[in-house]
Image: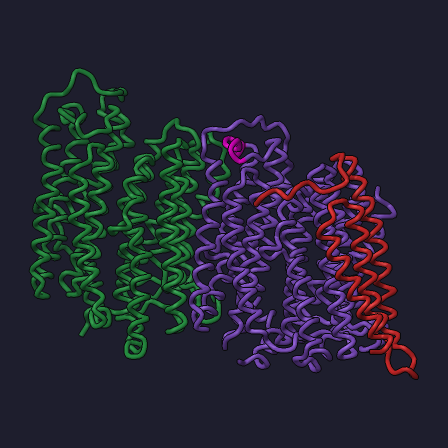
């Protein structure tokens, strides 16, 4: 196992960890953090996959993708935080109400 | 687009366009609405008459618009379609005048007449449809356009009846759709062709063709009120009388019966249908419906419900005539489209007159009403005699051709069915007639309205008398050229051309 | 703008016009009401030109800035893209027209609606023109964020929680998709859809990537049982937004799934196809039953969307047969039909809601007479939703039934036909209000004729475009986006 593989597996692990937290945590802030952990995992995977042979320059395309992805994730996080505050001020709770049974 | 190609579209537009304008009219614009209605009616009648004349001269009227790969929207005039179109146009005239009188001063008339016009457009579309997909289009349109008429009064009972009506007819439409698509995957185009277009498939796909036939007949049988698909019809009696007249005499049930004729004659073809042993069971089902409807009618005290079950029974004469699969019986079946239409519309008009003028809804309330409303009851009597099949009323000829057609094809049981049915018809009509004419009227009628010297509003009486008279005339003049009977013979002869 | 010549890059204008509009309305909100009609006109005009190009000249491809793939960004339009763009343009124009009236009074909501909506329109157009799985991700994310912000505009607690739930689902869906993109890139070294299509072969990595992408997209398309987020969000949004979401946004993720399924995913996964079909059938039944149970008008319409989305997915098993092209065409027709009809329904429902002051179905009787045209719009749109002739919905249903019967998978006819019956039940649950005598409605809020006619016009379009089905089928087959797959997938 080389370093790139290690990074990739760590990334996948982070993604899974974030997914788990997203599912089980009720507090919206925790959910948003969980999403960021997932995002970091995905970016780590992308970064690791840029690795080619040890003596070659890394592939720039995944790096470009990671940068774009980070921009998207930052805006999404900012938006999510604002929305969370609005939810809290409207409903008085920092978490979503129980899913209406359907 | 040439004149001959646009004529079928014009026939539809002559009721569609006034209908759409009527929707937009404010409630109080009664005069404009009536004018629009009558102009549409007369224009349509003129166009249809012209086309009947043209078809007889060998003119070819066809509108064709591509719809889906291998499927066109086709409107076409042939002998059978003009037969049904003329019937609808004539009866629409009568019903429109009647409805204008009947709904005087009631709310939502713009809505009513708008949908009423759509309904007739759909019926004419069913008549003129040149292929199955066009037929389905108008068949479904008919369902949608009649629903608002059934629930017009907006009462709980009306809405419930509307739901029942929809549940039956939409399911029927879905079965029809499934059958058509299946047929399309086997045969390609679905255009009505004299003697059918499926003969080439009989060997490889016999089982599929039988299954498709069952789907199609079930889908059509809902509207034609074949047992066990008849449940909606008595429920739909909550509708205003002109609607019952239209639904039961012309539009809905006839569209179903007409569809059955189309499927057997112009999709399968008589020979193939007989070869696949499809006609026998259909004849059996029709016979069962005839007897069952008559028995049920006997048990009803509500006049309109009695008439409704009578319709269940009578419309199946059409299916029976076709399913006997012989030329003579076919004439009987086809001509019964017109005969039953004229007679039943008369009876419903009479029921409406009774309800509007005297507040009578039940058979037991009709004692002695002949003295109060002699003209209406004379029309009722003619209609009832026609239903029983007393010569020279129109109904007699239908039964005569059905019976002798059955004998021709070696099916004497048909005669037995007809005799039993006629006896039952007599059993549920004659006691009413006796009470009407020979018993003393009660002290007071349930809810009497006065119309001056006339027994009821002339707008109600005149259509009633004219349809009753027509029912008598088509019987008396059955041997004249262009009588319904002669025209039906022409249609049948096209089908049984050697 | 360029002239209408065969090599004018209309693909760029299709994306650029709404984007310029979004920037403009954000910077100069007071001029928005003036600018928006021009922007809409420009966008619809560009789409019309592009559709013309695709129909007459075939596939349009344009490398941005002259940089060809794999380095640059490629815009690509074939019949499938053209159909999606056309659908979006029709609904988009109508909703824009409606919203100028809906947001007549200047407000915070109106201030943000225009930039967000135009941004969303940009994202949709970009999505339909992207030919690169990472650009698709970017457009997809932009689309999701704009859509969620639009839901939140309503500002009510329902809308905010609906938006929040939608946001979490959306982020989860797109991250999952992104992970799939990463796997594809690492395996094949390209992001271009065309190149990937040539390279992909069954392997553990491509299966994993396929699985991740499909899962992410299903979540965002709200396929049963992942539909839970859709009804609250769609029902709580402001009326024009509800229409946009139900008509267009969920279709975008379905388009993405369809495109990848046809072009990229390694081999036709028969098992996965049948699973998607089964979930689609369940969605039809479950969504319809839920719609029937609702007591609020907008929720009923939203659940109807869940049901109608089910039809789209029936193509996946139906395409596992010699009649694949018919099955896919049926799904595209369903997209068009549902977009027009559902937008009309939501706009009509919004008019009724605004007029009556509530949308409790049981109390809607007698409401009709102020907004009769909206009720007519609801009814006519219902014809298309039920799938009765001559609507596009009927054409779609006919093609789908044909694909089922000709392809020897008759059992799929049951949900198709049964769904129509259930749709009749819930549509007429509403329609019967028109005729009902009981109801409590003050009916104080006037509705402008523009709002009513927009809803009605859309419903008429859904009904009438059925007659254009042959032309639409021809357009759809330009560049044979659907037949490509048929060749490669013969089992």
Chain B rendering hue: green
Which chain, by letter, is purple?
C
Q: Position of residue B182 (x, y in %)?
A: 39, 68
Q: Nearer the viewer, residue B189 or B1?
A: B189
Residue B8 visible in image: no
What stretch of residues is rendered in magenta? Answer: C361-369
Is residue B237 in sight in this rendering? yes
Q: Main secondary structure of the magenta part?
A: helix
Report which quarter residue C125 is drawn in. Answer: bottom right
Chain that is red in the image: A
In the image as oriented, which residue stretches furthest toward the front? A1
Q: Position of residue C473 (x, y in %)?
A: 56, 69
B456 to B144, vertically: above or below: above
Work out whether residue C155 or residue B157 is closer to the camera in this orientation and state it.
C155
Q: Residue C330, image x and y in percent?
A: 53, 65
Q: Is residue B490 left or right of residue C100?
A: left
B163 relative to A37 in the view: left or right: left
Residue C226 in the magenta stretch? The answer is no
Q: Nearer the viewer, residue C472 or A81?
A: A81
Q: Nearer the viewer, residue C84 or B334?
A: C84
Q: Position of residue C368 (x, y in %)?
A: 53, 34
Residue positioned most to the top: B443
Specify the quadrant that holds the N terminus of chain C: bottom right
């Amino acid at each position: 196992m080389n370093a790139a593989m290690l990074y990739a597996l760590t990334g996948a692990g982070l993604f899974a960890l974030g997914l788990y937290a997203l599912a089980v945590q009720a507090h919206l802030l925790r959910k948003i953090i969980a999403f960021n952990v997932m995002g970091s995992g995905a970016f780590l995977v992308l970064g690791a996959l840029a690795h080619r042979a040890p003596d070659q320059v890394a592939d720039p395309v995944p790096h470009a993708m990671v940068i774009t992805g980070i921009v998207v994730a930052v805006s999404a996080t900012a938006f999510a935080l604002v929305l969370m505050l609005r939810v809290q001020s409207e409903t008085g709770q920092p978490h979503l109400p129980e899913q209406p049974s359907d | 687009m040439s004149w001959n190609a646009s004529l079928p579209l014009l026939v539809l537009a002559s009721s569609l366009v006034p209908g759409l304008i009527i929707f937009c009219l404010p409630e109080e614009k009664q005069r404009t609405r009536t004018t629009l209605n009558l102009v549409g009616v007369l224009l349509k009648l003129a166009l249809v008459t012209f086309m009947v004349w043209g078809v007889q001269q060998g003119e070819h009227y066809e509108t064709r618009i591509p719809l889906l790969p291998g499927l066109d929207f086709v409107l076409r005039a042939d002998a059978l379609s003009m037969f049904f179109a003329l019937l609808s146009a004539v009866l629409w005239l009568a019903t429109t005048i009647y409805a204008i009188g009947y709904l005087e001063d009631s709310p939502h008339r713009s809505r009513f007449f708008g949908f009423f016009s759509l309904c007739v457009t759909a019926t004419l579309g069913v008549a003129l449809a040149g292929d199955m997909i066009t037929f389905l289009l108008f068949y479904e349109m008919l369902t949608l356009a009649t629903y608002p008429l059934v629930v017009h009064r907006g009462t709980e009972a009306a809405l419930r009846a509307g739901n029942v009506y929809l549940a039956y007819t939409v399911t029927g439409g879905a079965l029809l759709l499934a059958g058509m698509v299946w047929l399309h995957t086997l045969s390609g185009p679905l255009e009505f062709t004299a003697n059918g277009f499926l003969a080439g498939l009989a060997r490889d796909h016999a089982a599929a063709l039988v299954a498709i036939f069952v789907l199609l007949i079930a889908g059509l049988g809902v509207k034609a009120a074949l047992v066990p698909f008849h449940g909606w019809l008595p429920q739909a009696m909550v509708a205003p009388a002109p609607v019952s007249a239209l639904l039961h005499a012309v539009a809905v049930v006839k569209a179903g019966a007409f569809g059955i004729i189309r499927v057997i004659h112009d999709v399968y073809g008589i020979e193939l249908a007989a070869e696949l042993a499809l006609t026998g069971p259909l004849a059996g089902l029709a016979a069962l419906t005839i007897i069952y409807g008559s028995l049920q009618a006997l048990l009803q005290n509500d006049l309109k419900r009695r008439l409704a079950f009578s319709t269940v029974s009578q419309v199946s004469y059409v299916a029976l005539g076709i399913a006997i699969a012989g030329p003579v019986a076919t004439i009987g079946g086809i001509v019964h489209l017109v005969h039953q239409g004229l007679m039943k519309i008369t009876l419903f008009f009479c029921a409406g007159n009774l309800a509007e003028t005297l507040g009578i809804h039940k058979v037991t309330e009709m004692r002695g009403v002949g003295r109060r409303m002699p003209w209406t009851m004379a029309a009722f009597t003619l209609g009832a005699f026609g239903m029983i099949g007393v010569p020279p009323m129109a109904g007699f000829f239908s039964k005569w051709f059905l019976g002798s057609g059955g004998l021709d094809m070696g099916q004497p049981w048909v005669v037995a069915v007809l005799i039993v049915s006629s006896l039952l018809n007599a059993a549920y009509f004659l006691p009413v007639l006796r009470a009407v004419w020979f018993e003393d009227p009660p002290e007071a009628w349930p809810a009497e309205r006065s119309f001056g010297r006339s027994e009821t509003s002339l707008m109600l009486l005149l259509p009633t008398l004219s349809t009753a008279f027509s029912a008598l005339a088509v019987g008396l003049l059955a041997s004249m050229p262009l009588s319904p009977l002669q025209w039906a013979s022409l249609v049948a002869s096209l089908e049984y051309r050697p | 703008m360029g002239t209408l010549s065969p090599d004018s890059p209309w693909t760029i204008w299709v994306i650029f016009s709404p984007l310029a509009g979004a920037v403009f309305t954000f910077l100069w909100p007071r001029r928005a009401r003036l600018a928006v009609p021009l922007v809409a006109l420009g966008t619809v005009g560009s789409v019309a030109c592009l559709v013309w190009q695709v129909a007459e000249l075939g596939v349009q491809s344009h490398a941005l800035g002259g940089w060809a793939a794999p380095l640059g960004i490629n815009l690509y339009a074939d019949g499938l893209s053209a159909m999606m763009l056309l659908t979006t343009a029709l609904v988009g124009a109508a909703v824009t027209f409606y919203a100028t009236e809906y947001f007549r009074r200047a407000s915070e909501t109106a201030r943000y609606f225009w930039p967000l909506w135009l941004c969303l329109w940009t994202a949709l157009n970009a999505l339909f023109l992207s030919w690169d799985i990472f650009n698709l991700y970017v457009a997809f994310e932009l689309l999701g964020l704009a859509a969620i912000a639009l839901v939140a505009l309503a500002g009510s607690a329902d809308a905010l929680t609906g938006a929040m739930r939608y946001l979490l689902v959306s982020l989860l869906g797109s991250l999952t998709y992104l992970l799939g993109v990463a796997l594809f890139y690492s395996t094949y070294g390209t992001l271009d859809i065309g190149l990937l299509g040539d390279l992909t072969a069954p392997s553990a990595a491509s299966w994993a990537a396929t699985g991740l992408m499909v899962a992410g997209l299903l979540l965002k398309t709200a396929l049963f049982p992942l539909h839970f987020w859709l009804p609250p969000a769609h029902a709580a949004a402001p009326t024009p937004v509800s229409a946009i979401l139900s008509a267009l946004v969920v279709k975008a993720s379905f388009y993405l799934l369809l495109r990848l399924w046809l072009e990229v995913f390694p081999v036709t996964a028969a098992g996965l196809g049948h699973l998607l079909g089964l979930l689609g059938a369940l969605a039809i039944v479950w969504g319809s039953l839920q719609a029937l149970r609702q007591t609020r008008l907008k929720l009923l319409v939203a659940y109807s969307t869940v049901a109608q989305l089910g039809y789209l997915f029936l193509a996946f098993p139906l395409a596992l047969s010699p009649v694949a092209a018919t099955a896919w065409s049926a799904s595209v027709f369903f997209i068009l039909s549902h977009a027009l009809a559902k937008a009309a329904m939501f706009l009509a429902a919004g008019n009724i809601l605004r007029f009556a002051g509530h949308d409790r179905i049981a109390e809607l009787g007698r409401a009709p007479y102020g907004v009769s045209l909206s009720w007519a719009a609801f009814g006519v749109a219902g014809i298309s939703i039920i799938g009765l002739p001559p609507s596009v919905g009927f054409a779609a249903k006919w093609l789908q039934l044909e694909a089922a019967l000709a392809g020897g998978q008759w059992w799929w006819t049951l949900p198709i036909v049964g769904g129509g019956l259930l749709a009749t039940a819930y549509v007429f649950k509403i329609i019967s209000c028109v005729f009902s005598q009981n109801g409590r409605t003050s009916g104080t809020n006037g509705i402008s004729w523009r709002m009513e006619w927009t809803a009605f016009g859309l419903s008429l379009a859904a009904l009438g475009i059925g007659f254009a089905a042959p032309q639409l089928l021809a357009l759809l087959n330009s560049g044979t986006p659907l037949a490509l797959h048929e060749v490669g997938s013969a089992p």
